[in-house]
Amino acid sequence: MIPICEQIVCPWTAQNPRHDHQLIFPLSDDRLLLVWSEYYVQSPSYIFRTPHDEGGRPADRSPCHLAGKVSTDSGRTWSERIIIQENIWGWNVKHPNLLRLPSGEIIFTFTAWQSAEERNVFMKRSSDECESWSEIVQISEPGWYCTNNDHIMQLSTGRILLPAHGGPGFKFVTGNPLYSFVFYSDDGFRTWQMSEDTMTAPGRGAHEPTIIERQDGTLLCFLRTTMKCIYKAYSADGGVHWSAPEPTDLPAPDSPPLLKRIPTTGDLLLLWNNVPSEVGWPRTPLTAAISRDEGETWESFQDIDARPDYGAAYAAVTFLGDEALVTYSIGSTSWAGDKEITLKIFNIDQFY
């Protein structure tokens, strides 16, 4: 697919060598807020790194805060960056999610990586278009929990779902399978609960769930696994209970899929790495597909990014009128773990 606009919105620098887990959120007055995980260096020697240097390469646990940029022209240009959430925890903070409630209030959730044994999900609120924020509230009980960018959603019933993985008593050690679930709330996350069922799969388990509400009110969940394909599960009660995950015929490495509904057509859009592998690589191509039957079958397979020497993953999409703004993190196969964020803007009819 050839985009109508393409740019690297978060470029590599020695000071900020990795950028990922991004989303674009509409604000008032036709503004867009780009929020992402921006890693930063603290050691004097690292400021002389190149993306190819292994020494000091940015790992998942490296220092990271949540940064933001604003666009006033539908994503064509962006402001300088600001800090949306400082890193006040042991390792870093990332995985942003933003949701506007019917009242206009905005919920902002994120995951703090506090140590090898502890990750927790937090939330704050804004009633003035992200100009100021409430006190931070912890959603998860102390333990090992994780969310993913651009995955929070509100159902037709008003219930809010925040997909997550980990859970009570979970320990992130080799051989421990990952479990997925949702936090859910019926009062705008003043109070919340965890789903009664968890979802897992053979191999490394199932994590980074992405969920869509179908026309009949049931929920469809796609799951990241090491089984060379996406797994799926269903809920008939708004996310409280889930069916046992089962494999789909969609090949995938150990990387996250993303499900979204296209507002103008009502069809489902899937973005994922369309290549079978039991490990996290290769993460190319990044592919789009359309479902006209609520996720039962998929068609119109087209590559968003198919460069063999770049990995492309952790996609997010925002729909504006007849356009789709697709963002994802990229990294050259010759780099040491560094990443940038690319934005590609498409006309929605291009997906068909």
Image: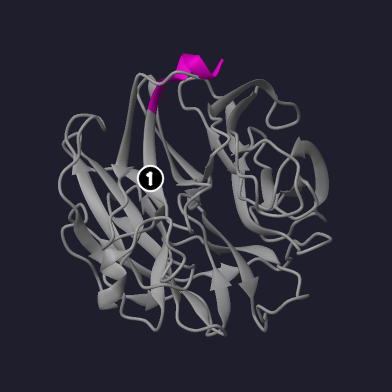
At x 44%, y 18%, the residue is: 2
Q: From what the image shows, is residue 235 above or below residue 88?
A: above
Q: From what the image shows, is residue 199 above or below residue 347?
A: below
Is residue 347 visible to the viewer in this orientation of the structure?
yes
Q: Which color scheme does this rendered protein use?
A: one colour
Q: Position of residue 211 (x, y in %)?
A: 61, 47
In terms of image quadrants, where is residue 320?
top left
At x 25%, y 76%, the residue is: 44
Q: Position of residue 256 (x, y in %)?
A: 61, 49
Q: Is residue 125 left or right of residue 147?
A: left
The magenta span reads 345-352
Query: Quick one: 1 or 89, which is closer to the camera?
Result: 1
Query: Quick one: 324 or 8, which is closer to the camera?
Result: 8
Q: Could you tell me which quadrant the C terminus lies in?
A: top right
Q: Is residue 203 left or right of residue 22?
A: right
Confirm whether the magenta stretch covers residue 350. Answer: yes
Confirm whether the magenta stretch covers residue 277. Answer: no
Q: From what the image shows, is residue 68 above or below residue 145?
A: above
At x 63%, y 54%, the residue is: 209
At x 75%, y 38%, the residue is: 251
Mark 1: give few (<14), some (14-19) or many (20+) Cα within 10 Å: many
Query: Quick one: 285 or 77, which is closer to the camera?
Result: 285
Q: Is residue 99 left or right of residue 164?
A: left
> What amino acid type is highlighted by mark number 1?
Ile
Query: Quick one: 186 or 230, which is closer to the camera?
Result: 230
Is residue 158 visible to the viewer in this orientation of the structure?
no
Q: Which residue is mark 1?
A: 341
